[in-house]
Amino acid sequence: MDSRELTYKIQGCVFEVFRNLGAGFLEAVYQQALLRELREAGLSAVPEQPINVYYKGEVVGEYRADIIVENKVLLELKAQTALPPTAEPQLLNYLKATEIKIGLLINFTHPKATIKRLVM
């Protein structure tokens, strides 16, 4: 499956979760529901995978990816009425710290879930 097909399938899962849950839940609720939906779609999805950040060959920090799908797409989940200006740069930095080239910034908000595709 190429990256376009994969992100299209992921988007379908996101919209299915939002169709069933709607807006107003915490990010953790959407994460668990999306994990279930991704797995039901036959996709490998790993939550809270630790990612090391390196500086000149030394680990200087760690973060946890919300969900990594098929080791190809990093999902950053939000459940906020408006995304902070740091959301996109944060996801780009996460991509930079990994071998993953595609990230989806997903916001489960009213009136609909939004998805922004970022590529490194």
Image: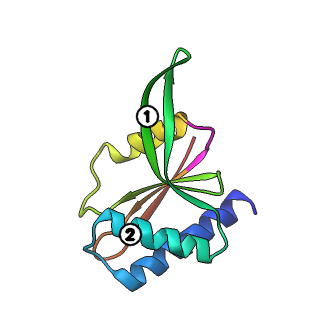
Furthest-top residue in this view: 56
Q: Is residue 87 above or below residue 58?
A: below
Q: Residue 111, percent across and down? A: 29, 77
Q: Which residue is mark 1?
A: 62
Q: Amino acid at mark 1?
A: Glu
Q: Work out how far the residue at label 1 is from the one at label 2, CA to CA, in angstroms.
A: 23 Å
Q: Residue at 35% across / 70% down in the picture?
A: 29
Magenta region's main secondary structure?
Answer: loop
Q: Residue 91, percent across and down? A: 44, 44
Please tell me whether residue 15 belongs to the stretch shown in magenta.
no
Local crowd at mark 2 within 10 Å, few (<14), some, or many (≥20)? Answer: many
Q: Nearer the viewer, residue 4 or 99?
A: 99
Q: Residue at 44% across / 73% down in the picture?
A: 33
Q: Secondary structure at mark 2?
A: helix
Please tell me whether residue 99 belongs to the stretch shown in magenta.
yes
Magenta residue span: 98-102
Dot 1 and dot 2 residues touching (CB under 8 Å):
no
Residue depth check, mark 1 versus mark 2: number of the one nearer the observer: 1
Q: Which residue is mark 2?
A: 30
Q: Residue 64, percent across and down? A: 44, 45
